[in-house]
Every structure is written in C-alpha cells, then in structure tokens.
Amino acid sequence: MKFKVSAELEYDIKAPSTLILNIHALITAHQKVLHEELTIEPPIKIEELNAMNGENRFARLVTEEAGLVKIKYEALVDNYYEVKDHSNVQELPVSSFDASVLPYLNPSRYCQSDKLSRLAFNTFGHIESSFEKVFAITDWIYKHVEYLSGSTDSETSAYDTVTQQAGVCRDFAHLGIALCRALTIPARYFTGYAYQLNPPDFHACFEAYLGGDWVLFDATRLIPLNGLVKIATSRDAADASIASIFGDVYCSNIKVSCDYVGEEPFVPIYYTRSIFDGVTYY
Amino acid sequence: MKFKVSAELEYDIKAPSTLILNIHALITAHQKVLHEELTIEPPIKIEELNAMNGENRFARLVTEEAGLVKIKYEALVDNYYEVKDHSNVQELPVSSFDASVLPYLNPSRYCQSDKLSRLAFNTFGHIESSFEKVFAITDWIYKHVEYLSGSTDSETSAYDTVTQQAGVCRDFAHLGIALCRALTIPARYFTGYAYQLNPPDFHACFEAYLGGDWVLFDATRLIPLNGLVKIATSRDAADASIASIFGDVYCSNIKVSCDYVGEEPFVPIYYTRSIFDGVTYY
Amino acid sequence: MKFKVSAELEYDIKAPSTLILNIHALITAHQKVLHEELTIEPPIKIEELNAMNGENRFARLVTEEAGLVKIKYEALVDNYYEVKDHSNVQELPVSSFDASVLPYLNPSRYCQSDKLSRLAFNTFGHIESSFEKVFAITDWIYKHVEYLSGSTDSETSAYDTVTQQAGVCRDFAHLGIALCRALTIPARYFTGYAYQLNPPDFHACFEAYLGGDWVLFDATRLIPLNGLVKIATSRDAADASIASIFGDVYCSNIKVSCDYVGEEPFVPIYYTRSIFDGVTYY
Amino acid sequence: MKFKVSAELEYDIKAPSTLILNIHALITAHQKVLHEELTIEPPIKIEELNAMNGENRFARLVTEEAGLVKIKYEALVDNYYEVKDHSNVQELPVSSFDASVLPYLNPSRYCQSDKLSRLAFNTFGHIESSFEKVFAITDWIYKHVEYLSGSTDSETSAYDTVTQQAGVCRDFAHLGIALCRALTIPARYFTGYAYQLNPPDFHACFEAYLGGDWVLFDATRLIPLNGLVKIATSRDAADASIASIFGDVYCSNIKVSCDYVGEEPFVPIYYTRSIFDGVTYY
C-alpha cells in the first residue's frame, strides 16, 4: 500500500528550547520509506534518533533563537499488512510470551490496567476467544465513549475515560489498551498517519497481541484499518507524543495529510462482529 | 563489595498459574555474580528471561498443580560503585541526552511527573545545581512523608503520596522519580537487596541522571547507599515488581537477607547536605 | 413495626478526646422511640445534640482520661412505612422541588454526581419512569459491584466504586446516590439498624425523591426494605458517620443487633423488576 | 458599609429549562438590602427560595421557550462587619461547638479534608494559635498556588489544587477550607460581590470558625476583606454555585459590579502577619 503523508508543524519559540518530534514514518521490514524530506524554516540542525528499540524515530531540534519555526515532513511510504482469520488461532498463554512482549502487560501512565481489572473481568471475562474479547472491548468503547474534540487533555488517562465517557482517539486507544492488559492480553499504543481520517490529523489506535501477532484495533471506527502508516508503537502516549517540548514553546499550527497513492483501488477494511479477520502491520 | 544475598518466597498455588519473579542479582560489567542458586520445592522448571534491555532478569515458573511452592534464591555478588564529586560536574542539557535516556523523562504509571510539574518548579526550581536539586527532593520527601508500613498498596502512585505523605520505600522512590522528571532530570527506579535494612526486605530507591551518570538517591535514609545489590532498574515498580502473578496464587511468606562479606570493613555512605559526592552503580 | 435495636461500641482512649456518636434511633412523626437507654462505662457525661435539621441525633462524649470506654445503646422503636405503587405516580420536575430538597441534587464528598453525568445518562437515560430508573441503577450496582468486606475505606467514593466494582453497603449507597443526582433525581444517604442483616452491623442504603416521596432503595439486596430503623438521613456518609473521633482513639469492638418484636409475623419486602411498589419511611 | 452591586447574566436557552440563580445579596441581621431589583427579558416568572437554613437565597426561573434570556440584578446594600483582635481569643474545643457548626468540620465535594489531614498536620500542626494557623494556611496557598484564569473547571477540588498549584478564587477557597477542617477548624465557603476586584466578577473566599466567630479569610489577596457583600455561605461551591442549570442552556455573558457608596472614605483591610485582627460578617 503506497501512501503519501505530510505533516506541517509551526512553533512559536519564546526562548532557546529543545523539541523532540515524533512524526517520521517508521522504517520496518514491512514498511519502506521510498522517499522522505524534512525541511525547517529557518534552517536548524536536526538530529535523528533511533529510539525505543527501533519502535520510534525521533527528530531532535535545538533552537537557539526565539521566533517562528516551520517544520515540514513529507514521505512516500510503501507498507504491508496481513489479514489473518483469528477464529481458529490458538491463543498463547502468558507462559509462552517472549520477554519483549511482557512490558505490554504492565500498567503505564495512561493505561492503569491494575485499576480496571475487576471492571474488565466483569464486562468481558466471559468471552472465550481473545479476538472476540478485544473486539468486544472496542465495541463497548465505541458505544459508551463519545468522540468529543477538546473534552480531554494531556493528563487524561484510561481511568478517567472509563467514567467520563468522552475523549479523542488517544483516549479511546488508552482505554482499549488498559482493558486488554487487565485481561492479560498484551497491548500497545499505535500512532500514525491515517487515510480517510476526517478532519485530517495524526491518529492513535492500538495493537493487541493475539496468537503471536500484534493485531490492530481501533475503537473510534473513524478510519479503515488498512489505511495506516506507522509512526511508532509504544506503551502509551507518554512514549510517543508527536512533540516533546523542553522550553518556552507554543504550537501555533498543525496540518497533516495522508493520501493513498497505490495503483490498485483502495478497499477499506473495518472489523465487524462475527468476522475474525485481524489486520497486522509487521 | 562482596555481598551474600538470599530471598525465600513461599506461594500458595490454588490453580495452575504463571509467576514471573524478579529477584536475581543483575549481571553487569560492574556487578559480578560469583555464585548463585535458585531452588524450588517441589521442583518446577524455571525459565530465565533477560528482559528490559538487560536491565532485568526474570525467572518464569509455570505451576501445573495446586499446592505450596517454596522458592529460594541465594547469590554471592561482587559489585562496584563509584563516588564522584558532583559540585563541579557540568550538567547536561536535554539536547545532549542519548536516546536510551529519554524514556526516563516520560511520566509512567506510578510517577505522573506531568501532574507534578508546577509543584516541582515551585518547590525546587530555584536550586541551581542538579545534584543539590535532587538532594533537596529527597530531603523534602524524608521530612514530609512518613515511612509507614501498610499505609499504601500496589495502586499507590507519586500523585497520591505527595498529598497523603505516608508510604514505604517504593512510594518514596516513585515520588523522587516523579519530581526529578518534572524538572527535566531523567530518573529511574532501582530495586535491590540492601545491607543493614531493618527489618530485612527487598528495597527500592532511585537513580537520577546527572552529568552523564546515573546517581543513586534514597529518600528513606534507611540504608547506606553503598550497601546495595542491584536487581533491576526500570521506569517504576510496574516494570520491576518482585513477583508478577498470573493466576490464583497467594504469597504466604517472604524472607530476605543481605550480608556484607567483604574483607575490608564496611564504611557506610550517606549523603549529607553540602557534600556533593554521588554514588553510582555502573 | 416494632424493633429492638442495640449497639455496643468499645473505644480505646489514648488521650483526652471528643467522640460524636451517631447511633440513636431518629425520632420522627412516624418513628417512635418507646424506650431507649445509653450506658457508658466508666460513666462519662453525654450531651445529646439535635443536628442537621432534625435529620440526625448526635451524642457527644468528652473523655478526660485514657482507658477503655464501653458504650451501649438500646432502644425499642415503633416505626411506620408506606408502600406506594409508583407506576402511575407523576414525576415532579426540578422546578417544583421544595428548597429543602435541592441540596440533595448537589454533588457531595462521596457522591460526585458531576463526574458521573455522562455515564449515568448513557446507561440509564433511556428509561422513562423515575422509579424504574432508580431500580435499574440499584440493579446495575448489584450486578457490577461485588460486596467485599474490607475492600474499601473511609476515603472511598462513588467515583472510585464505579470503576473498582467492589465495596460495602456504604459504597453501594454512595454510588446509587451519585447516579440518581446525575440524572436530576434528588437522593440522600440513609443509615440505620437493619433486621436480618447478616452478619449484624449498622447498615447504609439510600432514598430517592420520587413523586414527592423519599423512596427507599438498597443496591446490596442484603435486607428486606421494611426491616429498617432510621438513625439518620444525610447527603452522604460524611454527615452520618457512626462515630466522629477527635483525638487519639481506637475502636476496639462493635456489636450491633436488630430484632423484630412486632406481634404480626414479619413479611419481608424486596423490590423486583416490573413491580413499582416503593417503600417510604416518613 | 454601603455598596451598590449588580450582576447581568445572559443565557442562551436551547430548550425549556430550569435555572436556579444564586446572585441575591443575603439578608441578615447585619446585612440590610435597602433596595433591590431583578429584571428579566423577556419577562419570566421568578420564584424566590429561602434555602440552606437562611444561608442562601435562590431565584428559580422556568423557561418555557428557547431564546436569549437576560437577567439583571441590582441592589443597594448596607452591611456591617466587626474587627476583633484574636491574639487573646481563647480557642474553643470541638466539645463546645454548637450542632450547627459541626457540619463544617466534615469533608465535602470540593474540600476533601479527610485526604489532606497528614499534609495539614505536617505543614501547620506546629502553629499554636488558631488564627495564626489559618493565616499561615492562606499565606501558604498564596505563595504556592498561582492565580490562573481558566486553569481549573467545575470538577476541580482542593485535592487537585494542592498538587496542581494553580486555580481561581473558588479553588483557593476550597483548599483553605479543606486544610482548616483537616485541623479540626470548622470552615465554610463564602461567596459574594467584592469591591475593588479586578476584573470585576463574583468572588469566593472562606470563613473559619475561631473563638466562636466566623472569621473571614481570603488566600487570593485580591480584595480588601471589608469590601464584600455576602451572597451565601455554604459547605463549598457545590451548594452555592451562581447558577445551577437543569436543561440545555449556555451562559453567553456575565457582567458583575460592586461599588462602594458609603459616605466615609473606604479604608481597605488586609491581613498581615503578626497582626491578629480578624474580620467577621455577622
């Protein structure tokens, strides 16, 4: 799947500061970046960091002067996802998980799975298949949580959202992750560019570890699951914020785009109850 | 420094379960495990996992039968710490941090540094030297937070402790970490065996990243800083709990010991105000 | 309905202290206290206060000396409740509420109705009749929240319970009250002696203001609704704790009893879905 | 002290709704309302309610139609306050408090004194005189909490503010109240019109019960303590919000004024450390 993505960020720098941006398309065996370009006005040296065990690419900017800084990232990406029928996939016990998977069972800043365990068991514990469980979780979130721009902020966590029942994509993802982990299903945050997201923006959803694969889920139902370009996976938004700012800096504008530029027509994939086809981005 | 450490854990297994223990002395360039032994009654196969980028050693047990399980870990450890005068150490800006250090600036489950930033700046922002800042944080915690066994539980976080002002070593560490991160000082959780801890138990303290070194701090003042055998470093207790239990299991007993067996007499190190000698375990 | 109730409380007084007890049967037009007796060993002067607009009777003790204090309250009470079919009761709008009812719409310490409004509307907003709404709330609580002694403490509030899904009668009541208020149904805390409660203890449930009456509800389903002797009604447990202690005092024992001593056989009342008979203690 | 006060409120009514306004100057033995007028456009019947044991005057409006509603309240008020030197006032023990005072020791929605007791004791417990204690509390709040419009919302409580260290007058008041109650000093919320408040707005501060008097304190230091016209006293803002709205209504404008119209020159009173003159509005 070929996508053309772009992000334009504008920052008002009040004093010398450091910014760590998290907007590059990730490079993996199954996501190739055919071309990419990062331009900055005025020109500032950028350092690229390969972080979080290769799950993230950071770009670090050190601004020495106050003023407006415009950052533009553009990339042409070719990625690959697999659709697997999970109806007969044997679920793996925690005793079989690789050490690299175990951290995604732990509670994290925005996903306090330890505080949601009783609720998770009461609500989803009776569902046998793991795929169905996670689908039921996203279904429950979709039905109970209202997508409401501006209703939450950077301190909002899954523990808040489960009661407040309002939020944005990040909150939907955190709640999904927390409920999965509470049920001993490893889950991680996924942030990326999303095709057909309206209005265009960075998107967040999550992956659950099912039968040995990281299967994508999105409780917002706002996008086709096969229209994503991965920026990062992480425990939660604490490790994958679009921009970490150290200094007196204000974001004055964000503009994001994601266009499908493949040759074949784009056939959107959404999950539906009773079909167990899971999407995995390797 | 040679230490002989041991941990005896007893679990009442009600149903087939998986336990992930986090009690092995870590093996690093500066901490040698001269001898170690893990015995289990009844004998159960144990799998050792090298986890969290080598910051942790897990032992995974899968119990197939109900009953009492007794685990005993014993080790003879030789480790090395350095004492460095930080009074003239130049503090490094965030723009210089290695990518591996950056995650320790992020908020985590038990260290919601994002929610403590104003309090941290108001209370400690005026202190110039980073070493003094972190010392002042531990001093403040020592004076404001009462060490009170049983006053907190596994859900208690730094955000709670800063107001409740009571807790155990784990809570003291979490609060120290959260306040450091709020001030853009990377900080991480340190768990280990502790010499002269009374009553004997596993201990938790924290490390702050100062001038390029991970310097040890302990707001409890319960132990000499040079009496530690490292088990793990991590973001917070979520990644380094002594035992992660998946199943119907109750801990019925814990017994821990840590003896100094070096040839030289043990000269305890505690920090005091106005001396800037920091202890680092490499 | 005649009941014989008693409460024995034992306090270990470490230093001169003041205790405010809240264990007297309330005296109302429909609850007569035929006989009552409060004895204290050693004898300490007790002051009785008529508090909270007659919704509560306090007994204030001032202990001048350290030592064990034993308090025993016994009463013979005759009270009266009414059962009214609410299926055709016209619900009153907020514009008709008397000023004395309005405070019971406000959030309180343990009933943060303002934080539960979206959840309440999403879960119960579609139910038309107010009686059915409140019954559905108690039904939901009964099914989702586990009655678990010792799982909560004096800081636990409805906001906690809705997610933790465990608690005792006080927590069940607080959650019921908070959900009612979130739906603009006035609701108040009810504490009393309860017949057939097992093990015997003080009990807490709640009243919702429906069609001009304060109708009793109990999400625990532990007792018959017509087996209560009212001690107090209040906004929540903050205003009606069994004992408010000012000083260094430990409760060493509590023993409570409530026996039915009427001449007619006791016919227990429980609510069931589809029957709209509400119990009101005037 | 004669004041001319006014409040203009504008509401956008989307559907038939009920509003309960809390903007009338309270009428007490020491606050006379010489003249007052409430006008509404379009004319809507208003019902005045004497609520909360005379501590509050409510005005209830029932709007039957959608549209813009403009409410204007104007009053000429003559009130009286006393200044008493508290340096030799004997503090009263809890055993002497009248039953009507006791509720102001209890935690409430926005003043979770039960969760702040250790912090309050650690920070202020050593101060002997109650007046000094409360002054120290307001001083601590003034120095630690930044007055920052828009930093909090209607869910923010003292438990949040003590850590977030930012808020508006209401948050300053709640924190002061909570800390007082934690130290067994009864305290209540005070809302009113405030002379010399800039920008003009409704104001909130608090009263502490000292030596038998309700003494006014204001941690914001934004106004002279003798420039107030009381609207209500209450447990906290939950019982005294300017407007309680039941329905689909948006506040589109608020304009408040408070002018001193006495004949004598206005001599502002502020507290200063070491002077123990407390202001009481009877």
Image (tube, coloured by chain):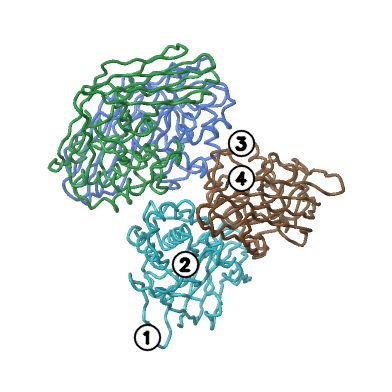
Chain colours: A blue, B green, C brown, D cyan
Image mark 4: chain: C
Check if mark 2's residue and mark 1's residue have beta carbons within 8 Å: no
Amino acid type for the residue under numbered disc 4: Asn
What residue appears at the point 53 percent right and 71 percent down from the top-left corner? D71
Q: CA distance from mark 4 to mark 1?
A: 63 Å
Question: Which label belongs to residue C253?
Answer: 4
Tell me where residue A65 appears, x and y as whole percent.
16, 48
Up/down of A140 relative to D122, above or below? above
Residue B243 vs residue B8, the one in the foreground: B8
Give the mark, 3 or 4, whose residue is nearer the N terminus.
3
Q: Where is mark 2, residue-wise?
A: D208
Up/down of D1 relative to D196, above or below? below
Residue B100 vs residue C91, the one in the foreground: B100
Select label 3 or label 2 by which is in front: 2
Question: Which label belongs to residue C5?
Answer: none
Check if mark 3's residue and mark 2's residue have beta carbons within 8 Å: no
Element at badge 1? loop
Select label 4 or label 1 by which is in front: 4
Q: Where is mark 3, residue-wise?
A: C146
